């Protein structure tokens, strides 16, 4: 990729949570390796989908990128500036350019604040509109943009449905005119009928405001619909990264192949002929991942080297990255 087209560059990102024992004197006995040395880039204006099983570290990676969690190691370059080195006021100013849409629309909105206060809070924090009247006008404009009645400003979150609450969360994220938004499973808590509306809204907003998304999800059908490129994550590591159509038509990593084989196809003839890949065993604990490749305990194509040396994450051609000794 041309360097001037890269908005986000993640290099060797690690996020470990310490395991301690003891009551009075606590000692460090290990780490939960939620994110373990991942690297990728996001271009301006694109949507990078990040998929994987529950507990694989997707949401933790998103929060570590935005510095909501301070990474254990690695670098996060946003527009060429290393976010991991920023602190205090410098980091606070940078947050205006990066926002997050949270997974649970019921937990991410303060029940004691009105919708107007929730959306205007980032405007006050960053002192974007000094006067109260300007802030109110901006809040009403944002409500219109996300498809809500602008006169809802004095209502409270409990008066809205899940889909409406998520629209409020999206309006809050848009309030400070960010360039980059981490969408942390923004539709997983919603009804299927509402999910499509939120996805279409996000795509419309991206086209309207030139936004860049990191879209975290576990629904592969949704990710294919909204993403330009897709990264597959397993037990804290990236297994594969490729263009959307390339990944679905030519999955290389055995884990990606297993994931895609589980996606139903609305054609009974094709579905009947398709071979399902059933993975054996359970996902290992991130506190004690296997030596070598993280997937070696469940991989149907495992080799001897997979048990000893972690495979490098390499480009096998055309921007198709994979961490597997088969290639």
Image (tube, grey):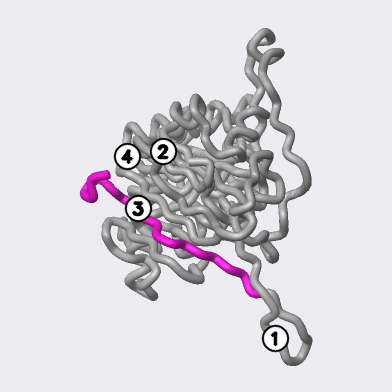
Q: Is residue 315 magenta?
A: no
Which residue is label 1 attached to?
27
Crowd tier of the residue under label 4, counting other residues whose Cα lies within 10 Å: few below 14, some 14–19, many 20 or above: some
Circle 4: element type:
loop
Residue 205 bears which disc, if any? none
What kind of element bears circle 1?
A: strand
| Front position among marks 4 and 3 | 3
- For disc 3, the neighbor class at 10 Å (few under 14, some 14 to 19, many from 20) is many
Looking at marks 3 and 2 on the same chain, the residue that comes earlier in the sequence is marked by 3
Which of disc 4 and disc 1 is earlier in sequence? Answer: 1
Please tell me how crowded label 2 is: few (under 14), some (14-19), or many (20+) other residues with Cα within 10 Å.
some
Q: CA distance from mark 1 to mark 3?
A: 36 Å
Q: Secondary structure at mark 2?
A: loop
Q: Which sits in the foreground, 100 or 121? A: 100
User: Is residue 9 covered in magenta?
Assistant: yes
Q: Are marks 2 and 1 in contact (CB under 8 Å)?
A: no
Q: Is residue 240 above or below residue 203?
A: below
| Residue under label 4 | 45
Residue at point 54% right, 65% down?
A: 15
Q: CA distance from mark 2 to mark 1?
A: 43 Å
The residues tagged by marks 3 and 2 sit, at their Cα atoms, a distance apart of 18 Å
So how many labels did they put on this image? 4
Q: Which residue is mark 3?
A: 8
Mark 2–mark 4 distance (CA, rounded to whole Å): 20 Å
User: Residue 221: image x %, image y %?
Assistant: 57, 28
Name the residue carrying label 2. 320
| Identity of the residue drawn at 56% across and 59% down | 309
Q: Nearer the viewer, mark 1 or mark 4?
A: 1
Instruction: Give the percent coordinates (x, y) of residue 317.
Output: 36, 37
Quadrant where the image shows the N terminus: top left
């Amino acid at each position: 990729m041309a360097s001037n087209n890269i908005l986000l560059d993640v290099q060797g990102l690690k996020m470990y949570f310490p395991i301690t024992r003891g009551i009075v004197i606590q000692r460090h006995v290990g780490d939960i390796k939620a994110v373990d040395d991942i690297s990728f880039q996001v271009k301006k204006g694109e949507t990078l989908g990040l998929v994987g099983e529950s507990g694989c570290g997707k949401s933790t990676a998103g929060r570590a990128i935005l510095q909501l969690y301070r990474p254990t190691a690695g670098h996060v370059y946003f527009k060429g500036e290393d976010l991991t080195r920023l602190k205090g006021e410098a980091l606070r100013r940078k947050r205006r350019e990066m926002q997050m849409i949270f997974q649970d629309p019921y937990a991410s909105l303060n029940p004691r604040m009105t919708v107007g206060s929730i959306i205007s809070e980032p405007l006050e924090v960053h002192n974007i509109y000094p006067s109260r009247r300007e802030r109110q006008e901006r809040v009403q404009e944002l409500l219109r943009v996300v498809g809500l009645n602008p006169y809802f400003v004095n209502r409270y979150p409990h008066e809205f449905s899940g889909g409406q609450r998520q629209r409020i969360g999206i309006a809050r994220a848009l309030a400070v005119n960010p360039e980059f938004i981490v969408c942390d499973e923004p539709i997983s808590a919603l009804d299927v009928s509402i999910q499509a509306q939120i996805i279409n809204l996000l795509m419309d907003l991206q086209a309207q405001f030139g936004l860049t998304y990191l879209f975290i999800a576990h629904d592969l059908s949704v990710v294919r619909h909204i993403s330009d490129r897709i990264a597959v994550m397993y037990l804290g590591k990236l297994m594969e990264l490729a263009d959307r159509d390339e990944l679905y038509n030519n999955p290389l990593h055995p884990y990606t192949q297993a994931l895609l084989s589980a996606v139903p196809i609305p054609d009974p003839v094709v579905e009947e002929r398709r071979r399902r890949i059933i993975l054996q065993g359970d996902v290992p604990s991130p506190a004690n991942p296997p030596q070598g490749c993280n997937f070696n305990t469940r991989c149907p194509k495992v080799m001897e080297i997979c048990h000893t040396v972690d495979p490098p994450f390499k480009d096998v051609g055309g921007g198709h990255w994979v961490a597997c000794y088969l290639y």
